[in-house]
Structures are given as C-alpha cells and as structure tokens.
Image: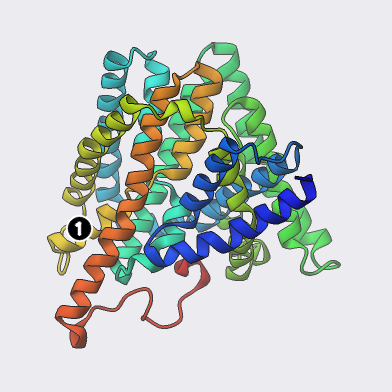
Amino acid sequence: MPTDLRYIVLIFGLFVLPKFLQRYAIPGAVTSLALGFVASLGDFLPRDHTLGLLATFGIVSLFLAAGLEVDLDDLRPALRPLLLHLFAFVLLVWGVSHLGHLLLELSPRAATILALALLTPSGGFIFDSLAAFGLQRPEIRRVRATVIATEILSLLLLFALTQSSSLPRFGLASVTLVALVLLIPPAMKLFARHVEPHAPRTEFAFLMMLAVVCAYVTRKLGVYYLVGAFLVGLSARRFRERLPALSSDRLLQTVEEFAIVFGPFYFFQAGGELLAEDFDAWAVLFGVGLTLVLVPLRVLQVALLQPPGKGIAWPERRRVATALLPTLVFSLVLLGILRAEYGLEGRIVGAVMVYTLLATLLPGFLLRRARGARLDVAPETAPETADDAGPTPAAEQT
C-alpha cells in the first residue's frame, strides 16, 4: 500500500475507532496503542520519519499541558497529607525496586526506574479522564493535587537516576537543567514584551516551539522529552499573573486540543514498538500477578493517607485512589528508556505492559459502575459531579 494511503487509513483509524470504543469505557490512548501493535504485526507501519515527528509533537504537547495544569498554590492547603503521601510513595518505590532487583536480577538503577514506571500516575491521561470518572469537585481537587505532587517527585527521581552514573555526567546534566530553568522565564518575558503586542495570537506557537526545543535538550540528556516540555508548562504557569497570555485557560485548552490531535500518534508508535514475543505466557501471568498485588496496595496507600475531615468517608477516599491508578504514559516512556539504555528483557516489558493496561482500564470500569450505582440508588440526592456541575474552567474540565 502506498505510504500516503497508509496515513489516510491511519488517521481515520486513530480518530474514529477510539471515539467509538470510549462508550465502552476503553480510553482512546489504549485503543491507539493496540492499533499500533496490530499494525506492527501486519507490517502496516509507515516506513518514513513522519510518524516519529508526529509522535514527538504528541508526547511534548501531553507534558506541556501537564506542566500548565500545575498550580503550586493548590498544593499548599493539603501540604501535610501530600508530604505523607510522597513519603509513602518513596517507600513503595524502594520496596518494589528492591523486589525487582532480587526477583528479576535487575541493576538497582534499572529496578528503581521500573518501579517508577509501575507506580507513577500519568497526570495528563488522568486529567483528561476525570470528567468520565464522574468524581465530585472535592475529589477532583484531591486527585489533581496528588497527581501533580507525585509527578514532580517522579521526574526529579528519574533525572537523578538517569544522570548519576558518573559525577561529570551528573554535573553537566544538572548545569544544563538549571540553565533551562533560568533561561525559560526571560525568553517568555521577551516574547510577551517585544513580540506578542505586535503579533497577537502567536503565544501558542511560541510556547510549543519553546517546549519542543527544551524537550529536545532533555532528550539529549537521556531523560526523554517529558522533562523539558513539563518545565516549559510549569514556568508558564508560575508567571500567570505577569504573563497571562502564556498561561490563560484559552491557551491551556488549545494545548490540550493539540494533544488530542497528536497524542494518538505517540501511543500508536509506542504500540508499534512492542513485540509479539514479549507477551508469552510468563509475561501475561506475571503482569496479572503485578496487578493483583500492586493495584490494591496503591489504592490502600492513597486512600489511607487522604486528609481526614468532614465528608471524606471511605468511599470517597477509595474513588480518589482508584482514579490515580493509570500509569500509561509514564510506563511507556520509562519502558522505552529501560529497553534502550539498560537492555530490559522483552518478557519483562510484556509483563509491565499487561499490568499497565489493566491498571489503566480498571478506573474507567469501576468508577463509572460506582457512579451509576449512586445515581440509581438516590437520583434526587446524587452528588454534584464534573459532568453535571455546570460550566467549569478549561483547566478543571481536563
């Protein structure tokens, strides 16, 4: 089949089939991933660099949107519970990495990265799914705060793990990262002062260009595209009052829409990199075992550490913890690093993917079912949810 026709079929499949399957609580990202895997089996993947470029735009826009979602002021009211959660998260990462080192014979560094892949919630994916989960507004706020804090910690741990193999490498990477942090705000100020007044409605193009450049720098450092793109979004959010054009709700909605268009190409390409031999009987059984052990453990870890207070009963805590289960994006990115840099065995990749898919699919089924049960039992007193609470800001709708 000619390459142009392949892309026509690909675009149709990525934008039609996932939307159809969402009615059955199957996330579009999972469908795109599965399509990529099937396409690789049928030798349907395009044989040029266009797909890689589209996938890069997808992952950059996903983490740019995740950075724009971060509002550090929202973390302060629940600072103590969040610190307890992060402490428990670090202990859980340590325990899982220790088991990975002993059972799978991985190096301590590779085992810790694998633990992060298993335990880190994927913020962009979760934010995009909150409306479908049917959570109440207080639950949404707790989910957002917990995801943001955990993602920031995981990115810092990932940077330390990938760059600490030698002191010169760690020093160079740290200097480069600090330089990025220091240079991004002045670049934004220059744009807001000298460009945007004379070229209105160009803030999205500038922000996306800056995210791609910074993502490319961090990719060269070995921490993939996500850190640079996340830093740009975080910096834009910090300067919201002084540079409203670069962090407005309208711009955030534009970035999210850009991610909706290009994100499926990233998941499709990631699915195409999976191998059929990765999913043997051992991988499937081990992945199911990981799910049976880690999912209840993660739910308990989050639910037990939710801040006590009026109206925060166990069902609400359980719903918040369940919404934090998806790890799809972080798992895909970190598995790519582990496979490229540490030669991770194929069947371990398959096992982690089985766990990741199950952990990503479970919240959609469990929370929608629980929501339907609540509405059936007491429709006249049903709690206000993200779907029926009226208009909300663009950042909260995600």
Quarter of the figure that contains the N terminus: top right
Tell me how many marks there are: 1
Near-viewer residue (361 or 42): 42
Quadrant for residue 331, please give it: top left
Q: Amino acid at mark 1?
A: Arg
For residue 161, above or below residue 306: above
Label 1: which residue?
317
Q: Residue furthest right?
A: 198
State the residue at coordinates (14%, 68%): 310
Q: Position of residue 57 (x, y in %)?
A: 67, 48
Q: Is residue 174 visible?
A: yes
Question: Picture coordinates of residue 144 (x, y %)?
Answer: 38, 57
Q: Residue at x 60, y 57 (%)?
A: 13
Q: In the image, what residue occupies the spot 69% across and 36% down?
A: 216
Q: How has the structure been colored for display?
A: rainbow
Residue 110 in the figure: left or right of residue 99: right
Q: Residues within 10 Å of mark 1 (few under 14, many from 20)?
A: many
Snapshot quadrant of residue 88: top left
Location of residue 300 in the rendering, given as x and y in whole percent from the top left corner: 18, 46
Q: Secondary structure at mark 1?
A: helix
Q: Is residue 46 left or right of residue 324?
A: right
Left/right of residue 39 with respect to residue 76 in the rendered view: right
Q: Residue at x 56, y 33 (%)?
A: 273
* Residue 218 percent location from the top left of the image: 63, 32
Q: Does residue 392 lie above or below 359 as drawn? A: below
Q: Is residue 227 visible?
A: no
